[in-house]
């Protein structure tokens, strides 16, 4: 006598698979979870000049044809060079003033990646040194066009309280000069 699969067994298996797919999708999609957003706000002091600069041009790139022509043909006078690499170890503070309370350090580098304008590939770690997030850090990656009013970068991870962080950072020039540096306002939104 041949055995046949029971219709009840098939129906039960199908319902079990459908339920598993539903709960897996719901858990992975975040659509049913409450989204918690953390907002951090601080100022980065980016100093290329003075007695103790916190940022430095490490590799001078090649001048672009447009920049060389704008400076009367002298490559040495160009302020924006394709391929420039700069490193930074900048203070993060609560306010824009130099004496404002320090909350951390911005450590990383930028590479000038455009032949026109001041577009950089940014790799940055925001290391928190004070407050409830002291000892934690955020990893920031992005394309930063300093000619725009607001620049957006992505938060790709973190350490400590920010482990597995994701979100974005918005930066604005508060008081900034491309030659000397200055103060950049940063808002970070984490989900």
Image (cartoon, grey):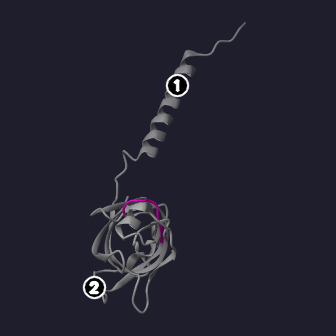
Label 2 CA crowd tier, 10 Å (few <14, some 14–19, many 20+): few
What number is the disc on residue 97?
2
- Answer whether residue 113 is magenta in the image: yes
| Picture quadrant of residue 6 | top right
Query: Outermost residue toward the front?
Result: 72
Q: Quadrant of residue 46?
A: bottom left
Residue 16 place in picture, x, y as percent: 52, 30
> 106 or 66: nearer the eye?
66
**Residue 168 visible in image:** no
* Horizontal side of residue 157 vs 66, given as left or right: right
Q: How many marks?
A: 2
> Looking at the image, is 2 positioned above or below residue 188?
above
Judge by depth and name the residue closer to the eye, 139 or 136.
139
Residue found at x 31% / y 87%: 98
- Residue 14 is labelled as 1
Q: Decide: few, some or many residues near mark 1? Use Cα within 10 Å; few <14, some 14-19, many ≥20.
A: few
Numbered disc 2: secondary structure = loop
Tell me what residue is drawn at x 34 percent, y 59 percent. Answer: 36
Residue 151 shows in this picture: yes
Q: Extreme bottom residue here?
A: 51
Q: Which residues are magenta?
A: 109-117
In the rendered image, the vertical position of residue 35 relative to residue 131, given as above or below = above
Name the element at disc 1.
helix
Q: Position of residue 67 (x, y in %)?
A: 39, 65
Q: Which mark is residue 111?
A: none
Quadrant showing the N terminus: top right
């Amino acid at each position: 006598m041949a055995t046949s699969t029971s219709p009840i067994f098939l129906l039960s298996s199908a319902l079990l698979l459908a339920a598993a797919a539903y709960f897996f999708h719901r858990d992975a999609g975040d659509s049913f979870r409450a989204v918690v957003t953390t907002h951090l706000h601080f100022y980065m002091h980016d100093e290329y000049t003075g007695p103790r600069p916190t940022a430095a041009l490490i590799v001078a790139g090649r001048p672009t044809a447009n920049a060389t022509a704008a400076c009367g043909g002298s490559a040495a006078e160009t302020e924006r060079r394709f391929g420039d690499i700069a490193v930074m170890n900048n203070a993060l503070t609560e306010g824009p003033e130099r004496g404002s309370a320090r909350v951390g350090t911005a450590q990383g580098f930028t590479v000038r990646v455009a032949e026109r304008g001041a577009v950089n590939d940014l790799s940055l770690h925001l290391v928190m040194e004070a407050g409830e997030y002291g000892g934690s850090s955020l990893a920031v990656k992005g394309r930063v066009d300093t000619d725009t009013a607001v620049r957006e970068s992505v938060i790709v991870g973190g350490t400590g309280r920010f482990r597995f962080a994701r979100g974005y950072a918005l930066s604005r020039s508060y008081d900034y000069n491309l030659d000397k540096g200055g103060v950049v306002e940063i808002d970070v939104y984490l989900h």
